[in-house]
Image (cartoon, rainbow, N blue to C red):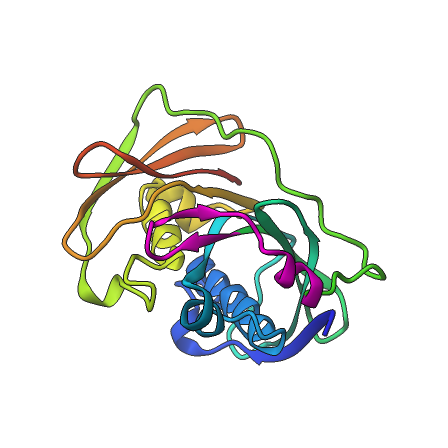
Amino acid sequence: MEFITESYRIRITEVDAHSKLTIPALNGLLQEMAWRHSVVAKVSVHDLSAQHNISWVLSRLKIWIDRLPNYDETVTVKTYVQDIDKYFYHRDFKVFDQEGNEIIRANSVWGLMDIVRRRITSVPDWMRAITPTDTNEKYVEKVSGKILGISNVETERRFDIRWHDIDSNQHVNNTKYVEWLLESIPTDTLNNGTLRSIDMIFKNESIFGDKITTQSQSIEHGFIHRILNQNGQELVTGETIW
């Protein structure tokens, strides 16, 4: 199947202090849609790990936001594979309101991890053969380029990784990194700002018991971010535009 679409009603546990969908909840919704599409295409985590010792890992995600849906609003989410290169699947997401207006779009880059060697491996030919790309869709802009590195830490938060932060791959789920990244943004921006885009590069994994630090630095129209583990290893870099 080239694409899937599903309707989704925003729940009270998924909204912020302004009754709008939170970014971690949005990211979780997009991840759920990617999972469901992979199941239909017979390339789900369970299919790949059981038969081929590989599993999906999210390498990069950029989300552009025109507006966030409100509590109890019903939206339609669409996802499809835009392209496949040697190492990565490029997957798009689009979110529409009840009038059919596109309110959110995203482009993501997914790699395949060898679960024994714990490193990225190339996309097998058999996966290319069974994964259609949607050639009739107007593609979302492919995310590319570097994210600026932090030169002056302005805000910082620290967290211990808990058991409930771990997913079925036995490492921290990417939705948690989104949450932690946003926690280092000044409260005034979170309360009064309007997020227009978020771009994240996922570099290394973390596991239960690790201690992480999330840091931010202001730039024109937004912030740059990074998340480090207790050894100073960079796990995630990001940029938010407000």
Q: Is residue 213 above or below residue 16?
A: above
Whether residue 241 appears in this view of the structure is yes
Which of the 4 image quadrants contains residue 203?
A: top left
Residue at the outermost top position: 151
What residue is shown at x 62% (from left), y 57% (from top)? 67
Q: Residue at x 51, y 74 (%)?
A: 71
Of residues 225 and 203, the one nearer the viewer is 203
Q: Can residue 64 be seen in the rendering of this structure?
A: no
Q: Is residue 122 magenta?
A: yes
Q: Classify residue 166 as left or right of residue 189.
A: left
- Residue at 58 percent across and 56 percent down: it is 124
Q: Is residue 68 above or below residue 77?
A: above
Instruction: Give x and y (percent) for residue 11.
Output: 46, 78
Q: Which contiguous range is marked in magenta?
A: 111-130
As drawn, 19 above or below 195: below
Quarter placement of the N terminus: bottom right
Q: How many marks?
A: 0
Vertical arrangement, residue 79 with respect to residue 157, above or below:
below
Left or right of 185: which side holds 30? right
Q: Position of residue 113 (x, y in %)?
A: 43, 53
Q: Magenta segment: does it hold 196?
A: no
| x then y, percent, for residue 17 | 39, 63
Residue 176: name its quadrant: bottom left
